[in-house]
Image (spheres, rainbow, N blue to C red):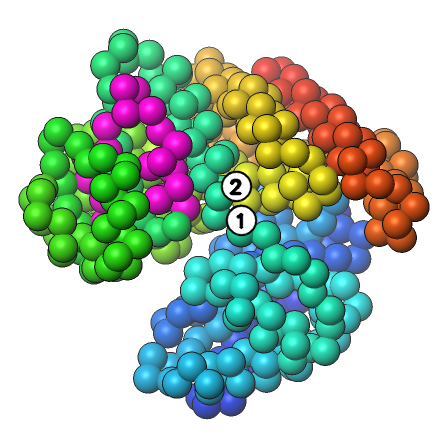
């Protein structure tokens, strides 16, 4: 693996837009990572997110490098000009997409129509687009369940606070058993709300569908609180799902959760994980928690049935997260540090040549989806077993 900011590009776009592309690593000459759209994104954030992608792929031994893109779009721009700007961006990175050096994907404010506009501008084909939010919530839910087992706080429902509840957070709420978890606080860009007795997942879903991020102000139940106060609540599990670096050295001393299970990539800034570990707070890395958006969607795209993906996440993946916490406790280090050791020390699988041949055969129609799906599932299960063993031995 080649890494260490292989390439960084700043691109001026139509309508006053600007884009940043950071390729942090290349594996077999290729990389991938989502496109994040925001009026205030900067290259430092994109650089941190690209590194998270490298760590994610490295941890799960997936054969690709990490990259990320950030696009600044003026807030007052029309929808027509927005699409024109994204097509302009696609055109200007067509050499990266066309040569397979960088494959853009969905991320914050970049859904299927935005991604299609980018590929259209690049004049490159794009296949079916998978909703990765559902798969991200799958891994996040199992990480939360692993944290529950590790904390061992009895049979009572554990309390959760979810910062930046979007589509992933919505799916996560739906996945959690109310007899085991109580969602006592949520926030969006519109504000935050808390209620000691907890919010029903169905209520959150219904209100969010009707009002978007503004459902926070429309909920009659609960108490409105400042958004930054959600991080300070005395809960069992804190789930950061918002922007990069929401947990910093400045607010680390005010965090009182027993465990942090981030859906967001790069949720920690600077030495915040070390400070939180000193306080006895267990911090999982975002790239492990949210990894379902990569590995589970890849399984689905390869023809693996949903029930098999659910089983894999509830068994091997959940055990990996649990053992990561247990081994970190035994060694007296933060799970962020132990996961980083595994991600940076990952090695390429010896069976990759066979996987490459099977993938080519599938793409050419020489292999049925069912047969390739069973092959892919067997191979990835083998990798997860090796990761689980490595966590137990070396983390």
Which residue is at the far bottom?
15
Circle 2 Cα neighbour tier, 10 Å, few/some/many (<14 / 14–19 / ≥20): many
* Local secondary structure at mark 2: helix
Task: Kindly indicate whether the residue at mark 1 contacts the one at mark 2 (C-beta within 8 angstroms).
Answer: yes
Q: Nearer the viewer, residue 5 or 208?
A: 208
Task: Indicate left or right for 201 with 97 as reference.
Answer: left
Q: Nearer the viewer, residue 369 or 30?
A: 369
Q: In the rendered structure, which segment of residues is drawn in magenta?
A: 168-188
Location of residue 33 by image quarter: bottom right
Location of the C terminus by quadrant is top right
Q: Nearer the viewer, residue 180 or 384?
A: 180
User: What's the mark number on residue 228?
Assistant: none
Q: Provide residue 264's location: percent of width, then percent of height.
A: 41, 47
Q: Which residue is mark 1?
A: 132
334 versus 106 height, above or below: above
Q: Which residue is mark 2?
A: 135
**Residue at 9% from the left image edge and 42% from the top image edge:** 222
Q: Is residue 362 magenta?
A: no
**Residue at 33% from the left image edge and 24% from the top image edge:** 177
Q: Provide residue 30's location: percent of width, then percent of height.
A: 75, 57
* Local secondary structure at mark 1: helix
2 versus 280 height, above or below: below
């Amino acid at each position: 693996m080649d890494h260490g900011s292989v390439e960084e590009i700043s691109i001026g776009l139509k309508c006053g837009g600007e884009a940043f592309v950071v390729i942090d690593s290349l594996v077999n000459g290729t990389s991938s990572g989502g496109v994040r759209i925001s009026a205030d994104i900067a290259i430092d954030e994109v650089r941190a997110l690209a590194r998270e992608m490298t760590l994610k792929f490295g941890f799960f031994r997936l054969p690709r490098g990490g990259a990320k893109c950030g696009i600044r779009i003026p807030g007052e721009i029309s929808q027509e000009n927005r699409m024109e700007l994204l097509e302009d961006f696609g055109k200007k990175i067509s050499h990266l997409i066309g040569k397979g050096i960088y494959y853009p994907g969905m991320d914050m404010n970049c859904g299927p129509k935005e991604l299609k506009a980018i590929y259209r501008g690049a004049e490159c084909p794009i296949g079916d687009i998978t909703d990765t939010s559902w798969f991200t919530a799958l891994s996040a839910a199992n990480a939360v369940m692993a944290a529950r087992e590790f904390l061992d706080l009895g049979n009572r429902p554990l309390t959760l606070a979810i910062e930046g509840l979007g589509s992933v957070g919505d799916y996560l709420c739906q996945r959690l058993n109310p007899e085991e978890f109580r969602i006592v606080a949520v926030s969006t860009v519109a504000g935050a709300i808390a209620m000691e007795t907890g919010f029903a997942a169905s209520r959150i879903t219904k209100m969010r569908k009707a009002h978007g991020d503004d459902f926070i102000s429309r909920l009659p139940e609960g108490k409105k609180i400042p958004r930054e106060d959600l991080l300070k609540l005395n809960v069992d599990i804190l789930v950061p799902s918002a922007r990069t670096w929401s947990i910093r050295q400045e607010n680390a001393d005010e965090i009182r959760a027993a465990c942090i299970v981030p859906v967001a990539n790069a949720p920690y800034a600077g030495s915040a994980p070390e400070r939180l570990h000193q306080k006895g707070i267990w911090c999982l890395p975002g790239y492990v928690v949210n990894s379902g958006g990569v590995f589970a969607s890849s399984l689905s795209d390869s023809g693996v049935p949903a029930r098999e993906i659910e089983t894999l996440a509830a068994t091997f993946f959940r055990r990996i997260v649990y053992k990561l916490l247990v081994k970190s406790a035994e060694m007296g280090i933060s799970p962020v540090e132990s996961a980083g050791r595994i991600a940076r020390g990952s090695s390429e699988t010896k069976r990759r040549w066979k996987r490459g041949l099977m993938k080519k055969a599938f793409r050419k129609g020489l292999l049925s989806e069912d047969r390739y799906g069973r092959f892919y599932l067997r191979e990835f299960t083998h990798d997860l077993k090796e990761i689980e063993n490595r966590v137990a031995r070396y983390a």
